[in-house]
Image: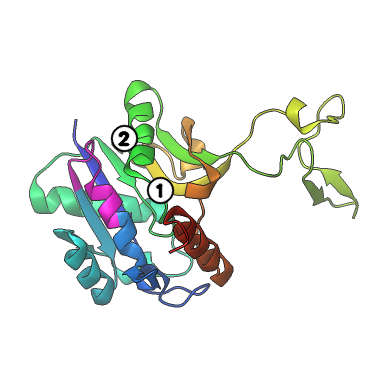
Amino acid sequence: MFILGTICCRGGSKGVKGKNIRELKGKPLITYTVETALACRLLNEIIVSTDSDTIAGVAIEAGIKTIIQRPAPLASDTASKWPVFIHALEEYERLTGNIVDYIVDMDVTVPLKTSADIEGAVETALGNPDTGVVITGYDPERNPYFNMMEIRDDGFAHIVKQSAKPIVRRQDAPVVYSLTPAAYVVKKETLYSVEHWSQAKCKIYPIPRERAIDIDTEIDFTIVEFLIDHQNGGK
């Protein structure tokens, strides 16, 4: 069983400029994920897929040995990650001759994930061979059966997921998860049998919300900095 860790990050970032290598508490953001990935005992090798020489240099300095040069069409604002995964896997196999069974993509924007979080997701995939994708998720503060609404064609707001009988307590609502890209474990054959992870047989591996924060905005950076300070006793 060969499990390939992938860290896919492009040079362009509209929400937070230079996000992937921006310093977070004195360390480039990508370095958090590289260090966490290198500590995972279940990953046979870790690669970085990027279109940026600068990101590649920082990744190599952090300990990555293999960089996959991502072509421009796969580094645009509209590019889906699914073909990025396929490109990274195929290029890695071509370069090394290794045959991959699973990829484990770990998003740079979730810096507080741990190696245990990643390994738990991998173990869930390996323990459920009929599952195509395992995604990390966390208990959300909103539930579509209880306190989330959408505006429909009639112009009125409606509960997103309506049940036969209105749910009056959040505890009575079906369990839902917010997804976090801390880890996406994808079986190789699934990459070619569906066009998107949502079409595959999926399982969720829950992680704590405080480790699941996905940095998309400046305020997210501030929150993560606060959490790191809190972990370090306010230092």
Going from the N terminus, do you reach mark 2 or mark 1 first?
1
Q: Tell whether 190 sits left or right of 168.
A: left
Q: Tell me if mark 2 has few (under 14), some (14-19) or many (20+) residues whose alpha carbon lies within 10 angstroms of its own.
A: few
Q: Residue at x 46, y 40 (%)?
A: 136
Q: Looking at the image, can residue 129 be seen?
A: no
Q: Looking at the image, can residue 158 be seen?
A: yes
SS at mark 1?
Answer: loop
Front one among 92 and 104: 104
Q: Residue at x 34, y 22 (%)?
A: 127
Q: Quadrant where the C terminus lies?
A: bottom left
Expressed as whole percent of the image width and height from the top left, the position of residue 40 reads 25, 41
Q: Tell me if mark 1 has few (under 14), some (14-19) or many (20+) residues whose alpha carbon lies within 10 angstroms of its own.
A: many
Front one among 15 and 116: 116
Expressed as whole percent of the image width and height from the top left, the position of residue 140 reads 63, 42
| Mark 1 residue type | Lys
Disc 2 from disc 1: Cα separation: 26 Å
Q: What label sits on residue 189 in the rendered view?
A: 2
Mark 2 in CB contact with mark 1 (< 8 angstroms): no
Q: Which segment did they paint magenta?
A: 34-45
| Mark 2 residue type | Glu
Quadrant of res 33:
bottom left
Q: Residue at x 19, y 35 (%)?
A: 2
Quadrant of res 98:
top left
Q: Which residue was labeled with disc 1?
A: 113
Q: Does the segment drawn in magenta span residue 196?
A: no
